Image (cartoon, grey):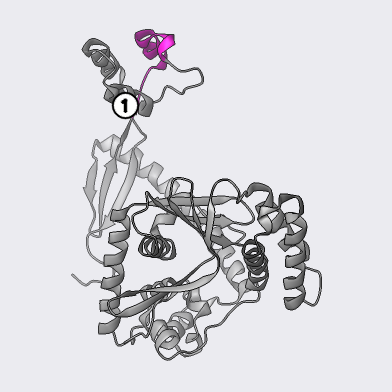
Amino acid sequence: MKPTSLSASAVQIYESCGARFLASYINKAQDLSGSAATLGTTVHAALEDYVKSGAYKTPSTSWRILVDLYTQHYNKHFQTRNQFKDGLDMLENWWNRTDLLDGRTVLSCEVKEEFQISGIPFRYIFDRCDELPDGAIEVVDYKSSRIPEAPENLKQKIQVRCYALAAAIKYPNRPAYWVSLDMLRYDLVGVKFTREDNIQTWNYLKEVISRIEADEGKEETLNPECRWCVRRSGCETLLVHAANGGELGALEFNSAIDKRAKLDYARAAIGRVIDSLDEFILQEAEEQEIIEHKTEETELKITVSSRRDIDTERVVKILGSDAIVPGAKVSISWIDEQLKSGGLDDTTRSELRQLIRKKPTAPSVKTKPLRLFGDDE
C-alpha cells in the first residue's frame, strides 16, 4: 500500500486493522460517523471563532460573545433546542477555568498543517497551539467526551505523541513541548514531551510507514472499532466471529448492554465457585504440606507473596516528631525517600532499615494446563 498522506487517526486505524486502512485510506471509502459527534463539532467551532476573533482579550464581554458564537453554530446543525444546554454547559465550564491572558500567546487555531516523513506528508490540525511564558509550546486539543481521560495514559496515545512531534518540528529548540487534552466537561490534562520522546515517535512513524508500504492490506484483525468500520458488512473475519457468538457480534447498543450484563452475572457466579474450590484446595494442601502438585492435566502452585510494613510509632521515636512534616503520611515510600536522601547518619539509617518488616499475604492458588486444552499428547 502506498498512502498519499498520513495522520494520527490513519496510523491508529492501520495498527488496529490493515484491511480497514486499505478501505479507508487507500481506496478512500467513506467511514461511518455518528450523530453524537455533532454537538462536539458545534462547540469546537464556537471555540475556534472565539479564539480567532481575539474576544478573550476583552473579559468584560467575552462570555457573551462566546455564547453568541455558539448559538450561531448550534442553529446551523440542530433543529431543536434539546442539546443546547449541554453544549452551553461545556463552554461555561471551559470559560470559568480558562484564562488565555495568563502570559501565553496563541500561535495558531484550527490550522491544517503537515510535515514530511519518509517522503509522505503527515497532516495534522491543532485545535489550539500556545507559546507559554517560558517559551515552551503547548498543543491543546478540545474533547467533548463524557468519559474523562486519565493523565497517565496520555503518552501512550498515538495522536498525543504525533502532536508533540509536530509541535517540535514547527517550533524547534523550545524548553519543552506539552500536549493537553481539554476535557470540556471536566478539566485539562496534559503531558510533557522531551526531545528523546519526540525522536522515539519519529522513529516509530518511519517504522509504521515501512510496514504499511510492505502490507497488501488483506489481513482482517478483530478490534473494538470493528462496529464503526466501513467494511463491517463484508468482513469475513467479523462475520465468522459474530456467527459463532463472538462478543463483537453484538453491534447494536442495547444488545451489547444485555450481553455484557449476562456475562457479568456469569462471571460473578464463576468467581464464587472458584473461591469455594480455592478454599478446599488450600485446606488440602496445608494438610498434606505441599505447595506444588500435578494432576494429569494441571499444574498447581500455592503462592505466598509479601508486602513491606513498618511501625510508624517507632519511626517517630527514632527521627523525632520535628523531622516529620505535619500532615505527612509515614509510609514505606516515605521511609525509602528518607533513606535515599543522604540526610541521615549511618546509625539512624540502620535503625530505620531494621524497622522494615515483610508481612506475608494470604496464600493463593495458581493453576496452569500441562498441555494446551484439546491436545492429544
Give whichever of 51, 144 is nearer the camera.
51
Percent coordinates x, y for residue 251 in the rendering: 56, 77
10 Å crowding of disc 1: few (<14), some (14-19), many (20+): few
Quarter residue 157 falls in: bottom left
Under tag 1, what secondary structure? Answer: helix
Give above or below for 28 relative to 323: below
Quarter residue 362 falls in: top left
Percent coordinates x, y for residue 306 in the rendering: 31, 33
Task: Tell me the quarter of the image containing the C terminus.
Answer: bottom left
Say which amino acid is labelled 1.
Asp
Residue at 21% x, 72% y: name it: 376
Percent coordinates x, y for residue 17 in the rendering: 38, 78
Task: Tell me the quarter of the image containing the N terminus.
Answer: bottom left
Residue placed under numbered mark 1 in the picture? 336
Confirm whether the magenta stretch covers residue 312: yes
The secondary structure making up most of the magenta span is helix
Which residues, given as a range, are shown in magenta? 308-323
Residue at 35% x, 38% y: name it: 283
Give above or below for 114 relative to 140: below
Residue at 65% x, 60% y: name it: 54
Give above or below for 134 relative to 353: below
14 lies left or right of 375: right
Task: Count the numbered circles shown.
Answer: 1
Residue at 48% x, 46% y: name it: 133
Quarter residue 52 falls in: bottom right
User: Does the rendering let one see residue 226?
Assistant: yes
Percent coordinates x, y for residue 46 in the rendering: 68, 66
